[in-house]
Amino acid sequence: MSLPYNLNQAKEKLENICNSMYGTEGTLKKELVEILEILTDENKIYICWSIKDIIERGKENNIKVSDQNAQKILKNINDKHDCNYGISWNTIDCHIDEFLCT
């Protein structure tokens, strides 16, 4: 299974933590194992957008987007996107325009 880079890193770190807790029983280890199972479930996919995507898209359209504004735009996209259409570059463009150009 191929995970996006960030999720793959998280999976590897969780595996290392779980392995270092060998023989340890407790709530933390159980929760980490549950998270690891979620990340490695081949019946799911994860699409990930980051503030870097927002900032770079702004640059492509000659709009300066700060890290703080990119976080707000990303949250707004997450809160208001239409799951029937997903999130596309057009969606990001519209939210950047709405947030910074109005």
Image: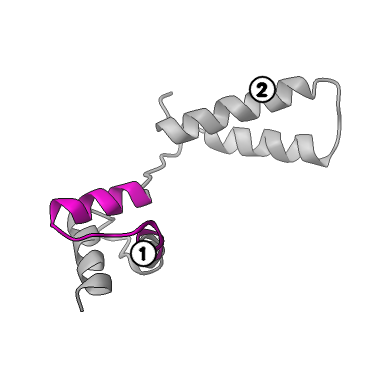
The secondary structure that most of the magenta stretch takes on is helix
The span picked out in magenta is 51-72
| Quadrant hosting residue 101 | bottom left
Q: Foreground residue, 11 or 43?
A: 11
Q: Give how far across and how far down residue 21 sits, in percent.
A: 79, 24
Residue 40, can we see it? no
Crowd around label 2: few <14 · some 14–19 · many ≥20 (10 Å): few
The residue under label 1 is: 69
Residue drawn where x is 38% and y is 45% of the image? 48
Residue 65 counted in the magenta span: yes
> Is 101 drawn above or below residue 22 in the view shown?
below
Q: Residue at x 37, y 44 (%)?
A: 47
The residue identified by callout 2 is 16
Relative image position of residue 4 (x, y in whole percent)? 40, 33
Residues at discs 2 and 1 in contact (Cβ within 8 Å): no
Name the residue rendered at 24%, 48% in the picture.
56
Residue drawn at (72%, 41%), measured in percent from left and top?
Answer: 31
Q: Which mark is residue 7?
A: none
Q: Compared with residue 4, is residue 69 higher up or lower down, i.e. above or below?
A: below
Q: Is residue 48 above or below residue 96?
A: above
Which three-letter amino acid code belongs to the residue tagged 1?
Asn
Q: Earlier in the sequence, mark 2 or mark 1?
A: 2
In the image, residue 35 lies at what x, y percent?
A: 63, 39
Left or right placement of residue 12 versus residue 2 in this view: right
Res 27 quadrant in image:
top right
Disc 1 packing (10 Å; few <14; some 14–19; many ≥20): some
Secondary structure category for the residue under label 1: helix
Q: Is residue 61 magenta?
A: yes
Q: Is residue 25 left or right of residue 18?
A: right
Tell which residue pokes out farthest to the left in this image: 61
